[in-house]
Image (spheres, rainbow, N blue to C red):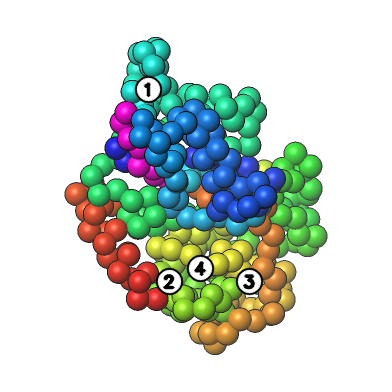
């Protein structure tokens, strides 16, 4: 059985998503909790591993992360008859994983359900949405929000930032806004990018793309903050992109202001074909 997990976490004390030896990561913490609940299968199979929609970096948060795992149904059956109390074996599994993680944990499984045929958390995804929070001198510093908000000691022009953001939308090579990785493409489709102030005056970036290359979101918000401070013009945002080279003209902002909000998937009957197309594209990179 393939299971979809919906996950949220505060990334402050994690060294990113991906399991790493001797480091605390989101994947490692969740897989260890699953191992404690499930043990091994009846034939000694290892506990299944999580496949995630998008690997987040150290310090990055998530309210809408998605992962999947393939689980032998015999493992669910072995959880015991108490599952009726929770409505289904998957409800019980989620409940027990949350119990292992503990009260007030910085990561949780919000829900588990059987995935539709063809679902792959990573390769079936058609877009990811992030939010980035910035407090400027107009907003002021709020210590209660310090772990998820970047502070900038200047007044930021949100209209200019929004105009710069919107100028970057579309299918482009974002090499200027990505940390290069050998053999990986930097061509992405930026579907949405805009800025607004919330009811408390905090600046919120909404960024949605088919996929993101390494550090892309934090670089995109960094160039907009430079525009908002008057250090770059609105036109510079697209000019720097079109130059196609990594630049020091703007800062890459801190990880803790960034949250993965949502992952989008096609209709159930298109999940498998989407996964096939994405895998083929990744293999060609």
Residue 38: image x %, image y %?
45, 30
Q: Are marks 2 and 1 in contact (CB under 8 Å)?
A: no
For the point 45% across and 59% down, the residue is 208
Q: Secondary structure at mark 2?
A: strand
Q: Which residue is mark 4?
A: 213
Q: Which residue is mark 1?
A: 78
The answer to which of 96 and 63 lies nearer the viewer is 96
Where are the magenta residues, as a range? 66-74
Q: Secondary structure at mark 3?
A: helix
Looking at the rendered structure, which numbered label has been put on residue 188? 2
Q: Residues within 10 Å of mark 1 (few under 14, many from 20)?
A: few
Q: Earlier in the sequence, mark 2 or mark 4?
A: 2
Q: Are marks 1 and 4 in contact (CB under 8 Å)?
A: no
Foreground label between 2 and 1: 1
Gap between marks 3 and 2 measured at Cα: 17 Å
Gap between marks 2 and 1 measured at Cα: 44 Å
**Relative side of 116 to 257, left or right:** left
Q: Earlier in the sequence, mark 2 or mark 1?
A: 1
**Residue 66 visible in the picture:** no
Q: Are marks 2 and 4 in contact (CB under 8 Å)?
A: yes
Foreground label between 2 and 4: 4
Q: Residues within 10 Å of mark 4 (few under 14, many from 20)?
A: some
Q: Earlier in the sequence, mark 3 or mark 4?
A: 4
Q: Earlier in the sequence, mark 1 or mark 4?
A: 1
Foreground label between 1 and 4: 1
């Amino acid at each position: 059985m393939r299971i979809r997990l919906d996950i949220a976490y505060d990334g402050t004390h994690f060294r990113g998503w991906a399991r790493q030896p001797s480091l605390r990561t989101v994947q490692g913490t969740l897989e260890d909790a699953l191992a404690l609940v499930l043990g091994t299968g009846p034939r000694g199979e290892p506990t299944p591993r999580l496949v995630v929609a998008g690997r987040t970096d150290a310090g990055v948060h998530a309210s809408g992360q998605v992962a999947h795992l393939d689980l032998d149904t015999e493992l669910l059956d072995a959880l015991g008859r108490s599952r009726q109390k929770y409505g289904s074996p998957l409800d019980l599994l989620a409940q027990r994983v949350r119990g292992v993680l503990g009260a007030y944990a910085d990561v949780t499984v919000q829900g588990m359900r059987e995935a539709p045929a063809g679902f792959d958390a990573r390769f079936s995804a058609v877009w990811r949405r992030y939010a980035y929070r910035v407090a400027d001198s107009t907003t002021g510093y709020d210590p209660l929000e310090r772990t998820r908000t970047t502070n900038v000691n200047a007044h930021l022009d949100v209209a200019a930032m929004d105009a710069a953001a919107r100028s970057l939308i579309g299918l482009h090579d974002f090499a200027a806004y990505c940390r290069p990785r050998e053999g990986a493409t930097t061509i992405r489709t930026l579907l949405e990018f805009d800025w607004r102030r919330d009811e408390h005056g905090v600046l919120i970036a909404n960024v949605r793309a088919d996929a993101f290359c390494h550090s892309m979101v934090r670089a995109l918000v960094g160039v907009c903050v430079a525009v908002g401070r008057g250090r770059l013009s609105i036109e510079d945002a697209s000019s720097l992109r079109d130059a196609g080279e990594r630049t020091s003209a703007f800062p890459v902002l801190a990880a803790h202001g960034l949250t993965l909000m949502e992952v989008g998937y096609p209709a159930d009957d298109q999940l498998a074909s989407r996964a096939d197309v994405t895998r083929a594209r990744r293999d060609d990179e």
